[in-house]
Image (spheres, coloured by chain):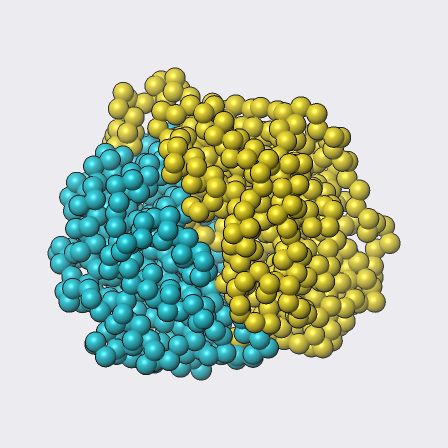
């Protein structure tokens, strides 16, 4: 996800190249607390209310009355993977421009008004969806809906404003990508992983294409995709479905639908993968030697029933945390890497990925690290996992969701994302049951089918030692580097 | 895996507030599933101050609709207690606290935590070492036992120490190539030269290589004590139960911490600008000044002035001038950060090498304008409206409540602060804001560090004569 504005001052820097790890799906609802896997099978209560406005806008309300606060989100079923070739970055660019002006809102005033009302706002863009949100006290909800509905169709763009914002986005790209070799490698790996699908193009866009994006590009994209019948309203917090319905009808409900938006989304799909791909990036700014691997696999939306859940559990057992197979073997026992991990990203509309990374221990060749990781994965594919591991992974997911769903904004995101990629409220709420059904055989079958190098890209990131030698004094410690200073 | 993420994570600027925010505890969701409705405006929150049978004090917010609890605690001291030559030992310790305790070695300890779905994490800042524990009520006794072992009897086994050392070293190597982190680290080294706040909280490759089991054990023994302990609990636990828990977990700790004296200080090297060359297309600058301590009567006015200048996102002057009007940066901001022994107002901007000089010039001009004229009546009103209106957003989950309260406790405020805070903001007048802006924003004294290849930007020594050193 790319956001319009950086919230956090200390942006997290991990060694993993994933810029936009999607939220793994869903939320679960539990009638009781027992943490055994059987609890997953227990009936899960419906939490969200769902309805449609006459103009086709979908609405989901997730009541949470713990504090008099609301999260208000509008999701559009359009993202970077829907862009026309040659205009990469336009979805994200438009997201920024949506904060400019309308007839009712002066230039740059949108966020200032939200702020004066004691609220916080932002927006983000992914390959499959774009979302706008505000967090405000309950009594400000009507005003937020009025403003969000206004900019759904009444955006005004001034040529100069557009060009200035394009410069901002080029700076955003420099911060996120050009300044960071891990991100550069990640982009290159994605471009290699997807032979034909637009997931291979970065959400933020290629630099040379962003440079040429125009006001007209933005408006064309906007006029086609931004319409109530291509949008989902998600409201979580201290509010009822009836209250939201009345407000939504009075605001979003007044906007005519756009018959040109096709609800079926067809993007170019990938052919069956035939050849493993390998990439090596040498960069003086890479501190460590690191190994990266992505596999193209189904997503929750494209998988056969139960398959995505099996991939989720398999990767938790293999690669999540210090009790995972990879960590125990490659870090603790073999001491070949200082860190190792992996996960499944299953939120995509058209496909998902299995991702792995490892940072080599001092002096260990990446080939050795790769072989060790492959051995662990091969063992999972050949022999499966144990019942104890599977039970623990299921319980772990249960607990994760209990703890992590504390946040109404997180709830809104889970429902919003799922609906934006074509899943349903029922899919979200039945996820625990689906997880509970996964068997040892399912895990083994999923591993055997998808841990296949033909589906993969392997990336090595290596410090370019010659580059470093040219650039700095013999002692390349940070202290020496800073001594360039006065 | 704390050691992978936790310690890579921070631009350990020592940002205490940031650190506290990162200690996310997530608690209350079960209420939703259980059909329990809890309405809890910030003003209605019942904060109890309790004392255990053994005399340990804590704040408690009970919430029995939710069969979960969160415990947050701080040992005052933090990485400014790292002994000379052992930079990074506090941070190292935080990464070792779930790596085995009592008779349980690392793997067994972590598997037991997983078996009961307990969450435990530690983090360090300049002034405190933070701990966080979350558990389901049904597993509370088991969680308390693991927490007790961790707090009282961490093992520091050689194999675990060496493994974590590798991770910390890899993190340092990584951070040393990250322009933003290098800019921040260099800024602290300049601004607090000669003071413990100058030291890199993650240590250096050399110090981390030299830290032993004994160093970790000694740091633990010195800083984990009852005299410097602050505790907040939120969730499904009564005062009596919490009292027993506190005695179990913390009761056997030494009465008094053995802390090194840390002097009150102000930034030095004022008016300097340094450039660290790094071959990147975009330079990152960190800039800052000394500011008022948390208990200074002008603190809140300073907080509001910072909000108007650079803390308020798209409403802030710097965002308007640098990003919105000129497209020079994606990110530009300031913050007011009161540490225990010093305070700063600092910020950062990232822009292509060719634009750094211009961006810094604009930032200096905005600082000067704010110092000379103060904010307008309208700016002040907008800032107050946001700050008072959004205060409730800080209390909409149990985890946020715990974070907020621990911060107040650490700053020696009473529970009534939550009630009076908005009134303090409201009370600030334009004259207050003008006076405090002038006091705080001495643009000539700005300490600037830039990392990258900024065009036309030179390292500069202090402005000669006449500028008093604020240290």
| Colour representing chain A | yellow
Residue B93 sits above or below residue A36 on the image = above
Tag count? 0
On screen, residue B225 above or below B202: below
Is B331 or A36 nearer to us in this picture? A36
As rendered, which of B336 and A306 lies closer to the eye?
Answer: A306
**Residue B383 visible somewhere in the drawing:** no
Q: Position of residue B118 (x, y in %)?
A: 42, 61
Residue A359: x %, y % from top left: 43, 33
Residue A434 lies left or right of residue B344; in this view the side is right
Question: Residue at image x 30%, y 69%?
Answer: B231
Q: Is residue A43 visible?
A: yes
Pinpoint residue B390: horizontal percent, then vertical percent. Answer: 48, 69
Residue under the image location 26 percent in, 45 percent down: B157
Instruction: Classify residue B164 as left or right of residue A76.
Output: left
The quadrant holding residue B411 is bottom left
- Nearest the viewer among B400 and A257 is B400
Asked if residue B191 lies left or right of residue A294, the reply is: left
Q: Nearer the viewer, residue B128 or A39?
A: A39
Q: Residue at x 63, y 58 (%)?
A: A436
Give chain B's shade: cyan
Q: Residue at x 56, y 33 (%)?
A: A378
User: B413 left or right of B285?
Assistant: left
Q: Specify the quadrant of the image occupied by residue B61.
A: bottom left
Residue B76: x, y in percent? 23, 61
């Amino acid at each position: 996800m790319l956001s319009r504005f950086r919230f956090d001052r200390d942006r997290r820097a991990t060694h993993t190249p994933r810029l936009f790890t999607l939220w793994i799906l869903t939320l679960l609802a539990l009638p009781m607390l027992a943490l055994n896997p059987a609890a997953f099978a227990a009936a899960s209560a419906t939490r969200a209310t769902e309805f449609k406005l006459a103009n086709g806008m979908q609405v989901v309300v997730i009541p949470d009355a713990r504090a008099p606060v609301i999260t208000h989100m509008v999701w559009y079923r359009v993202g970077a993977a829907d862009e026309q070739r040659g205009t990469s970055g336009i979805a994200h660019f438009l997201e920024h421009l949506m904060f400019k002006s309308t007839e009712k809102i002066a230039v740059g005033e949108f966020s200032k008004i939200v702020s004066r009302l004691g609220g916080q706002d932002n927006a983000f863009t992914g390959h499959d969806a774009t979302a706008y949100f505000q967090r405000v006290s309950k009594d400000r909800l009507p005003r937020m809906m009025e403003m969000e509905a206004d900019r759904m169709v009444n955006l005004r763009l001034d040529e100069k404003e557009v060009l200035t914002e394009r410069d901002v986005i080029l700076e955003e790209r420099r911060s996120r990508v050009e300044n960071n070799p891990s991100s550069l490698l990640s982009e290159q790996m994605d471009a290699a992983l997807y032979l034909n699908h637009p997931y291979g193009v970065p959400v933020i866009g290629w630099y040379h294409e962003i440079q040429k994006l125009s006001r007209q590009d933005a408006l064309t994209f906007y006029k086609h995709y931004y319409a109530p019948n291509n949008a989902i309203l998600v409201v979580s917090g201290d509010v009822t479905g009836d209250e939201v319905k009345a407000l939504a009808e009075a605001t979003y409900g007044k906007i005519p639908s756009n018959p040109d938006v096709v609800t079926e989304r067809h993007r170019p799909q990938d052919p069956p993968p035939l050849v493993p791909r390998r990439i090596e990036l040498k960069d003086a700014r890479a501190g460590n030697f690191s190994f990266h691997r992505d596999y193209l696999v189904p997503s929750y939306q494209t998988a056969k029933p139960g398959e995505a859940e099996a991939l989720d559990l398999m990767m938790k057992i293999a690669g999540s945390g210090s009790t995972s197979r990879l960590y125990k073997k490659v870090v603790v026992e073999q001491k070949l890497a200082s860190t190792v991990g992996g996960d499944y990203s299953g939120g995509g509309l058209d496909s998902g990925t299995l991702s792995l990374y490892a940072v080599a221990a001092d002096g260990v060749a990446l080939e050795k690290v790769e072989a060790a990781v492959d051995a662990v994965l091969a063992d999972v594919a050949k022999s499966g996992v144990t019942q104890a591991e599977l039970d623990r992974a299921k319980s772990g997911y249960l607990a994760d969701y209990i703890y992590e769903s504390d946040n109404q904004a997180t709830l809104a995101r889970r429902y919003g994302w799922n609906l934006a990629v074509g899943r349903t409220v029922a899919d979200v709420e039945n996820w625990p049951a689906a997880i509970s059904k996964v068997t040892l055989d399912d895990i083994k079958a999923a591993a055997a089918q998808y841990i296949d190098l033909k589906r993969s890209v392997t990336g090595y990131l290596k410090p370019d030692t010659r580059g470093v030698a040219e650039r700095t004094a013999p002692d390349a410690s940070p202290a020496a580097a800073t001594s360039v200073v006065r | 895996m704390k050691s992978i993420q936790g310690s890579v994570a921070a631009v350990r600027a020592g940002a205490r507030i940031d650190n506290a925010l990162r200690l996310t505890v997530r608690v209350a969701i079960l209420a939703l599933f259980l059909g329990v409705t809890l309405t809890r405006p910030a003003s209605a929150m019942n904060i109890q101050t309790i004392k255990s049978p053994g005399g340990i004090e804590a704040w408690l917010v009970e919430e029995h609709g939710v069969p979960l609890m969160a415990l947050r605690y701080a040992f005052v001291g933090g990485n400014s207690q790292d002994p000379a030559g052992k930079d990074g030992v506090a941070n190292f310790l935080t990464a070792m606290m779930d790596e085995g305790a009592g008779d349980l070695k690392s793997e067994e300890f972590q598997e037991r935590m997983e078996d009961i779905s307990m969450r435990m994490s530690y983090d360090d800042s300049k002034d405190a070492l933070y701990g966080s524990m979350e558990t389901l009520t049904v597993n509370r006794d088991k969680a308390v036992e693991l927490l007790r072992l961790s707090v009282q009897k961490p093992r520091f086994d050689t194999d675990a120490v060496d493994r974590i050392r590798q991770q910390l070293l890899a993190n340092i190597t990584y951070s040393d190539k990250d322009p933003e982190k290098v800019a921040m680290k260099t800024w602290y080294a300049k601004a607090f030269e000669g003071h413990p706040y100058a030291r890199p909280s993650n240590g250096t490759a050399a110090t981390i290589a030299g830290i032993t089991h004994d160093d970790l054990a000694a740091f633990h023994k010195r800083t984990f004590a009852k005299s410097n302990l602050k505790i907040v609990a939120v969730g499904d636990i009564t005062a009596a139960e919490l009292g027993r828990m506190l005695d179990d977990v913390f009761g056997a700790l030494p009465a008094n911490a053995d802390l090194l004296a840390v002097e009150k200080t102000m930034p030095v090297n004022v008016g300097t600008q340094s450039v660290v060359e790094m071959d990147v297309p975009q330079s990152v600058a960190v800039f800052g000044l000394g500011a008022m301590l948390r208990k200074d009567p002008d603190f809140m006015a300073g907080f509001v002035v910072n909000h108007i200048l650079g803390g308020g996102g798209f409403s802030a002057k710097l965002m308007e001038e640098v990003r919105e009007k000129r497209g020079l940066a994606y990110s530009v901001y300031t913050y007011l950060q009161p540490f225990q022994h010093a305070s700063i107002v600092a910020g950062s901007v990232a822009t292509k090498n060719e634009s750094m000089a211009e961006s810094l010039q604009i930032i200096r001009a905005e600082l000067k304008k704010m110092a000379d004229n103060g904010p307008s009546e309208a700016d002040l009103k907008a800032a107050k409206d946001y700050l008072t209106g959004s205060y409730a957003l800080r209390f909409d989950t149990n985890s946020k409540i715990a974070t907020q309260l621990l911060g107040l406790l650490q700053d020696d405020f009473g529970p009534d602060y939550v009630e009076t805070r908005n009134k303090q903001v409201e009370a600030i007048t334009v004259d207050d804001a003008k006076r405090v802006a002038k006091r705080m924003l001495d643009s000539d004294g700005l300490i600037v560090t830039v990392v990258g290849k900024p065009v036309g930007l030179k390292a500069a020594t202090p402005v000669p004569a006449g500028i008093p050193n604020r240290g």
